[in-house]
Image: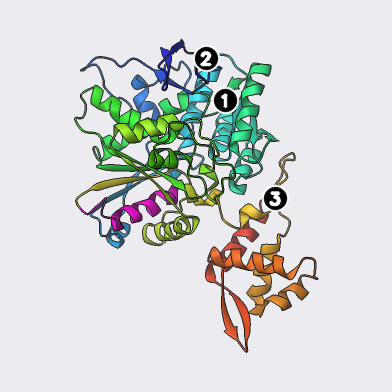
């Protein structure tokens, strides 16, 4: 069992503390060494550990029932896109509602094998929530480094599982550096996905499941942040082909937000270096990254598969989120919804048509990443989430009583901010589909939409928990 650098191909013995190549500084890949043809037999129920023969050895198997997630045939969504064979791999059905439960299960199992008491992880959401749950199951300490920008639903999960939460930096890139330093200083188990290649090994089981459920699709669409997830899927299918289990491979499609397009820019512009976006921005926080540490992995997957990479806007993501929910009854987080937004673009440009079979990865639940709840106050150093009224919530509550205009809102908010700031909030609420406006008596009135009322009800329900 060795580690191999995807860039310079240097090899090292496996150690969970070794997250980067000692020669070029790039991240590493786990080289399991595949068994010979004819020796593979998956056994056990349809779940993550069914594929243990193709996973790194784990004497202890810490499990909450991860894996074995549905592959949903999206008939109504397919019809709206003029497709025949569209499938959604629904990873929201994992124990903590995201695909990261697979990585958490393998990390914690490995940590128990190695007799570690504390795991450290930099995460902007799903992996932190997953790791906190699995550490609680195993009785281990979980130390999470989170950036300021983190979805409140995911933060709530981390808190309820009693993880130690430390805020560091604006975005995930900053938090990763802190986690790397802490693991070395404290001799803690490194459970950051970008720094421990076992995450790729765990997540490749998604490919094995899709193969058993469907076969090999023509296209597999995956959201990209740091770049490791799309490579996980690609590696899984490549291993199935190397083992002669299948003869075909999918084309991998990677999707990034327009405000955080580092990997896409490398491919489109033909750059040789990983591009750093100075001020990345998107509401899809799960894929908000400045400089993807596993960008080389993503590029390799897309190039080897003769695949594609593209960006989508936050508005396109938001529209896709609503469409998935309305047509398929599935509440996908923004990062997941980006895959369907990208698919729509690819259909419109003729790059994918009704002859093609397509799988979109729905990596996590929208219940973790509601748009307005993200703006609420969060107190990360206490055992509760501060749910103080935000300006946007106050505006929604005023509009839930009756339609009104900007100056009147300003007066009702006790003139605590400029009118310009009020209109900025109104524009943002309008962009999210929570309010609308109309002109009456030469004044622009604002009106709450049903989606805005739903958000208010969701806030009221969440407050009951704390």
- First in sequence: mark 1 or mark 3? 1
Say if residue 449 shows up in the picture: yes
Near mark 2 (Cα within 10 A), the count class, few <14, some 14-19 or many ≥20, is some
Q: Do residues under tags 3 and 2 come within 8 Å of each other at their CB atoms? A: no
Whole-Å distance between the Cαs marked 1 and 3?
Answer: 26 Å
Secondary element at image label 3: loop
Please give the range of residues in magenta. Answer: 336-354
In the picture provided, is 210 more to the left or to the right than 197? Answer: left
Helix, strand or loop for disc 2: loop
* Residue at the spot 67% in from the left edge and 63% down from the top edge: 393
Say which residue label 3 marks: 466
Q: Name the colour scheme.
A: rainbow
Left or right of residue 116, residue 218 in this image: left
In front: label 3 or label 2:
2
Q: Principal SS element in the magenta part?
A: helix
Q: Which mark is residue 138?
A: 1
| Residue 338 drawn in magenta | yes
Q: Residues within 10 Å of mark 3 (few under 14, many from 20)?
A: few
Question: x, y (%) of residue 44?
Answer: 33, 27
Q: Quadrant of residue 403?
A: bottom right
Tell me the residue that label 2 is attached to: 22
- Can residue 140 be seen here? The reply is no
Near-viewer residue (99 or 315)? 315
Give residue 456's quadrant in the image: bottom right
Query: Disc 2 vs disc 1: which is toward the camera?
Result: 2
């Amino acid at each position: 069992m060795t580690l191999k650098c995807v860039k310079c191909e240097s090899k090292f013995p496996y150690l969970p503390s070794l997250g980067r190549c000692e020669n070029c500084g790039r991240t590493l890949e786990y080289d399991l060494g595949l068994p010979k043809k004819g020796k593979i037999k998956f056994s056990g129920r349809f779940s993550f550990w069914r594929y243990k023969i193709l996973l790194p050895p784990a004497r202890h198997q810490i499990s909450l029932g991860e894996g074995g997630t549905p592959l949903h045939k999206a008939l109504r969504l397919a019809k709206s896109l003029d497709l025949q064979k569209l499938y959604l791999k629904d990873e929201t059905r994992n124990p903590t509602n995201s695909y990261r439960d697979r990585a958490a299960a393998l990390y914690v199992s490995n940590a128990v094998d190695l007799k570690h008491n504390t795991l450290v992880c930099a995460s902007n959401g799903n992996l932190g929530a997953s790791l906190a749950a699995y550490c609680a199951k195993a009785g281990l300490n979980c130390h999470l480094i989170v950036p300021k920008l983190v979805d409140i639903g995911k933060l709530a999960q981390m808190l309820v599982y009693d993880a130690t939460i430390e805020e560091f930096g604006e975005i995930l890139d900053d938090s990763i550096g802190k986690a790397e330093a802490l693991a070395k200083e404290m001799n803690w188990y490194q459970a950051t996905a970008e720094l421990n290649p076992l995450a790729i090994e765990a997540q490749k089981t998604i490919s094995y499941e899709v193969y058993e459920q469907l076969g090999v699709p023509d296209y597999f669409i995956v959201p990209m942040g740091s770049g490791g997830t799309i490579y996980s899927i690609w590696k899984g299918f490549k291993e199935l082909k190397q083992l002669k289990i299948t003869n075909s491979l999918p084309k991998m499609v990677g999707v990034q937000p327009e405000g955080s397009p580092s990997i896409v820019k490398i491919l489109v512009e033909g750059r040789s270096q990983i591009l750093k976006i100075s001020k990345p921005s998107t509401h899809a926080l799960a894929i908000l990254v400045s400089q993807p540490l596993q960008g080389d992995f993503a590029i390799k997957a897309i190039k080897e598969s003769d695949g594609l990479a593209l960006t989508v806007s936050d508005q396109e993501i938001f529209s896709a989120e609503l469409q998935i929910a309305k047509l398929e009854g599935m509440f996908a987080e923004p990062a997941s919804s980006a895959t369907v937004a990208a698919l729509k673009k690819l259909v419109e440009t003729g790059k994918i048509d009704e002859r093609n079979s397509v799988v979109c990865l729905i990596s996590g639940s929208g219940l973790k990443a509601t748009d307005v709840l993200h703006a609420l106050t969060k107190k990360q150093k206490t055992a509760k989430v501060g749910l103080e009224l935000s300006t946007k919530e106050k505006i929604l509550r005023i509009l839930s009583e009756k339609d009104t205009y900007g100056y009147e809102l300003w007066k009702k908010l006790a003139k605590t901010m400029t009118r310009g700031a009020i209109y900025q909030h109104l524009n943002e609420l309008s962009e999210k589909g929570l309010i609308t406006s109309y002109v009456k008596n030469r004044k622009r009135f604002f009106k709450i939409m049903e989606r805005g009322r739903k958000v208010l009800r969701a806030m009221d329900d969440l407050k009951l928990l704390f």
